[in-house]
């Protein structure tokens, strides 16, 4: 029976057998005795994207009262949900993200806590995922940005919209109805400044 720890681009946490490329966390939001989620969906404004294995160690999921292991299809999914790279297990990527985030948002020497504060305002609205108007047409969005159209989420790659699922991405779709931006605006500006998130292999042509 799969645990409830897989994250969608809209930030929801559900149970599915699909694991994905990355793990991460939002603090402690589970009961280790039952390995089930608590009612809250975050306990820290630091929402991280981590590697699944670090220095040869793998964690037993939801086994202790430590941070709650969440899983993402890929980094674009995690960024859309409002997470950012971890400065501990992904230091090089986190520094590249911070540099692009600073450039895109016109700031310098941003601390991780300052980035988290901005992201926390952008990712939530009354406790639910906050959607944003598109700042540019879809075909001008950078690779790795994600949008929502109706009940479906899409990643943008080379100006095309690919539908998201827990198993991977589908074929290109056109003429999305009233799409809204899932990726937090400050993160989007980081993508526009050159940060390239890791995408699931299904996004690439065979």
Image (tube, helix red, strand yellow):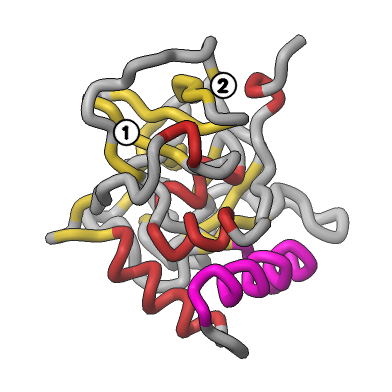
- Please report the residue visible at 20 percent of the width from the left and 52 percent of the height from the top: 128
The residue that label 1 is drawn on is 148
User: Quick check: is 93 in the magenta stretch?
Assistant: yes
Considering the image in quadrants, where does the N terminus appear?
top left
Considering the image in quadrants, where does the C terminus appear?
top right
Q: What residue span does the magenta drawing correspond to?
A: 85-106
Q: In this rendering, would 32 be left or right of 55?
A: left
Quarter of the image for residue 73 reads top right
Which one is nearer the viewer's eye here, 126 or 36? 126
Residue 132 image point, x, y percent: 26, 51
User: How many numbered discs, if any?
Assistant: 2
User: Quick check: is 14 in the magenta stretch?
Assistant: no
- Please report the residue visible at 49 percent of the width from the left and 39 percent of the height from the top: 140
- Please report the residue visible at 43 percent of the width from the left and 63 percent of the height from the top: 26
Residue 41 image point, x, y percent: 30, 56
Residue 11 image point, x, y percent: 35, 46
Which of discs 1 and 2 lies nearer the camera? The answer is: 1
Q: In this rendering, would 76 be left or right of 137?
A: right
Residue 1: in sight, yes or no? Answer: no
Asked whether disc 1 touches disc 2, contact meaning CB atoms under 8 Å apart, the reply is no
Work out whether 8 lies above or below 191.
Answer: above
Quarter of the image for residue 48 reads bottom right
Residue 184 image point, x, y percent: 39, 57
- Please report the residue visible at 54 percent of the width from the left and 68 percent of the height from the top: 104
Residue 200: in sight, yes or no? Answer: yes
The residue that label 2 is drawn on is 168
């Amino acid at each position: 029976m799969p645990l409830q720890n897989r994250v969608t681009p809209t930030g929801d946490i559900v149970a599915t057998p699909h694991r994905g490329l990355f793990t991460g966390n939002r603090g402690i939001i589970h009961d280790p005795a039952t390995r089930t989620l608590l009612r809250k969906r975050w306990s820290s404004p630091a929402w991280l994207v981590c590697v699944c294995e670090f220095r040869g160690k793998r964690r037993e999921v939801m086994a202790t009262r430590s941070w709650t292991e969440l899983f993402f299809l890929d980094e674009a999914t995690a960024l859309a949900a409002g997470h950012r790279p971890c400065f501990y297990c992904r230091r090089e990527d986190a520094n590249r993200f911070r540099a692009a985030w600073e450039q895109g948002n016109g700031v310098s020497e941003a601390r991780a806590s300052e980035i988290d504060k901005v992201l926390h305002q952008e990712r939530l609205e009354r406790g639910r995922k906050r959607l944003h108007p598109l700042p540019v047409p879809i075909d001008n969005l950078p690779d790795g940005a994600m949008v929502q159209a109706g009940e479906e989420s899409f990643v943008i790659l080379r100006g095309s919209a690919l539908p998201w699922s827990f198993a991977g991405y589908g074929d290109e779709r056109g003429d999305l109805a009233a799409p809204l931006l899932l990726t937090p605006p400050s993160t989007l500006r980081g993508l526009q400044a050159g940060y390239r998130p890791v995408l699931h292999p299904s996004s690439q042509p065979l």
